Image (tube, grey):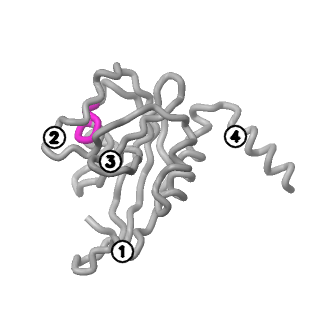
């Protein structure tokens, strides 16, 4: 499903543990890492898509997580020209994403990457909350930064105060 502007609706999932580290997953048979994410089907709400994608990509069910927050609106990124599929109608030029921040309340043994015929990921690890913004592929970087910054106050209570102080100092 592509919207009138050429963006595919999608959900992004920031899954954190009790130490506020985030799950960082390696794409199957690639040397690239990302957060779990996936398209929203026409009959789904974004929250329903989150739970489906969690199960498909990392084997987690709703009882393994709790929703902490979600971005206030859609965050968009454009695909580089080399990734555009010119023959597709309508053509997808990028993704618009709602990002969800989830708390992992299961056991690490619950994470299963091989639950489907074509696994999305073949490895995962916990990383510092901010690391993915530096490590993600260049064309997704701004979206990752925006999602992490918007959702950070839900995990780090003094984050908003620190940012406000920085803005005052720069003014």
- Label 1 packing within 10 angstroms: few (<14), some (14-19), many (20+): few
Which region shows up in magenta? 55-61
Which dot, 3 or 2, sits closer to the camera?
3
- Label 4 packing within 10 angstroms: few (<14), some (14-19), many (20+): some
- Of the numbered discs 1 and 3, the one sitting upstream in the chain is 3
Which dot, 2 or 4, sits closer to the camera?
2
**Residue placed under numbered mark 2 in the picture:** 116
Q: Are marks 1 and 4 in contact (CB under 8 Å)?
A: no
**Residue placed under numbered mark 1 in the picture:** 82
- Of the numbered discs 2 and 4, the one sitting upstream in the chain is 2
Q: Residue at x 22, y 80 (%)?
A: 87
**Residue placed under numbered mark 4 in the picture:** 160
Secondary structure of the residue carrying numbered label 2: loop
Percent x, y of residue 14: 44, 40
| Nearer-the-camera pick, 31 or 169 | 31
- Of the numbered discs 2 and 1, the one sitting upstream in the chain is 1
- Label 2 packing within 10 angstroms: few (<14), some (14-19), many (20+): few
Q: Residue at x 51, y 52 (%)?
A: 144
| Measured Cα–Cα span from mark 3 to mark 4 | 32 Å
**Residue placed under numbered mark 3 in the picture:** 27
| Measured Cα–Cα span from mark 1 to mark 4 | 38 Å
- Of the numbered discs 1 and 4, the one sitting upstream in the chain is 1
Instruction: Report which quarter residue 158 is drawn in.
Output: top right
Quadrant where the image shows the N terminus: bottom left
Secondary structure of the residue carrying numbered label 4: helix
| Measured Cα–Cα span from mark 2 to mark 1 | 28 Å
Percent x, y of residue 15: 43, 35
Q: Is residue 129 above or below residue 107?
A: below
Percent x, y of residue 42: 23, 57
- Of the numbered discs 3 and 4, the one sitting upstream in the chain is 3
Q: Is residue 113 above or below residue 32?
A: above
């Amino acid at each position: 499903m592509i919207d009138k502007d050429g963006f595919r609706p999608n959900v992004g999932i920031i899954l954190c543990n009790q130490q506020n580290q985030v799950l960082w997953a390696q794409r199957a048979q690639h040397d690239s890492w990302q957060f779990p994410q996936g398209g929203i089907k026409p009959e789904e709400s974004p929250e329903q898509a989150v739970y489906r994608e969690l199960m498909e990509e990392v084997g987690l069910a709703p009882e393994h997580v709790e929703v902490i927050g979600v971005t206030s609106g859609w965050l968009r990124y454009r695909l580089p020209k080399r990734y555009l599929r010119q023959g597709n109608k309508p053509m997808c030029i990028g993704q618009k994403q709602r990002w969800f921040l989830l708390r992992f309340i299961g056991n690490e043994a619950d994470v299963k990457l091989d639950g489907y015929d074509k696994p999305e990921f073949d490895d995962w690890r916990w990383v510092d909350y901010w690391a993915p913004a530096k490590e993600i592929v260049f064309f997704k970087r701004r979206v990752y930064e925006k999602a992490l910054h918007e959702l950070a106050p839900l995990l780090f209570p003094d984050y908003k105060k620190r940012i406000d102080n920085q803005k005052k100092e720069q003014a």
